[in-house]
Image: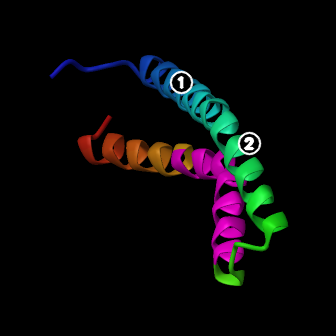
């Protein structure tokens, strides 16, 4: 196993945080057209009256989860940085 300087480890951490944010942005951008198509289909079904209240609630929940993807990405970065710091402390670096 190769040892790193503290500066290298900090730089690596920042690079990985940036990569994580960019990855979350790509996922969000890739799913946006899918969600727009899903919303169009849902709106047509609601206008026709062929959708139940439970289905409307489930769709609302899914849209809420989609809106929170950036928050989940930031929580992931936070957890990753805490775990990385604890690993470095355990290794005595």
Among the two numbered marks 1 and 2 on one chain, the one whose residue lies closer to the N terminus: 1
Q: Name, please, the residue furthest toward the bottom.
A: 53
Which residue is depicted at the point 49% across and 43% down? 81
Q: In the image, which residues are magenta?
A: 55-76
Q: In the image, what residue occupies the spot 68% across and 80% down? A: 52
Residue 43, position as x, y percentages in the image? 80, 58
**Left-right relation of 46 to 90:** right
| Pointer 2 residue | 36
Q: If the image is split into quadrants, where does the N terminus sit?
A: top left
**Foreground residue, 67 or 81?**
67
Distance between mark 1 and mark 2 Cα atoms = 26 Å
**Tag 1's secondary structure?**
helix
Element assignment for label 2? helix
77 is higher (above) or lower (below) than 75? above
Q: Residue at x 49, y 28 (%)?
A: 13
Mark 1 packing: few (<14 Cα in 10 Å), some, or many (20+)? few
Instruction: Please give the residue where the numbered disc 1 appears in the rendered image.
Output: 19
Q: Is residue 70 left or right of residue 44?
A: left
Does the magenta stretch mainly form a helix, a strand or a loop?
helix
The colour scheme used to paint the residues is rainbow
Seen from this angle, which residue lies furthest right?
47
Q: Specify the quadrant of the image occupied by residue 27.
A: top right
Looking at the picture, how far across and down is residue 77, in whole percent?
54, 43
Vertical side of 9 occupied by 79: above or below = below
Q: Quick one: quadrant of the C terminus?
A: top left
User: Magenta stretch: residue 57 in it?
Assistant: yes
């Amino acid at each position: 196993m190769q040892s790193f300087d503290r500066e290298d480890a900090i730089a690596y951490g920042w690079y990985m945080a940036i990569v994580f944010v960019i990855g979350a942005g790509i996922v969000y951008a890739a799913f946006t057209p899918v969600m727009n198509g899903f919303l169009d289909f849902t709106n047509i079904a609601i206008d026709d009256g062929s959708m139940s209240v439970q289905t409307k609630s489930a769709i609302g929940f899914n849209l809420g989860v989609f809106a929170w993807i950036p928050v989940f990405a930031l929580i992931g970065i936070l957890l990753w940085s805490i775990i990385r710091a604890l690993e470095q402390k355990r290794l005595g670096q």
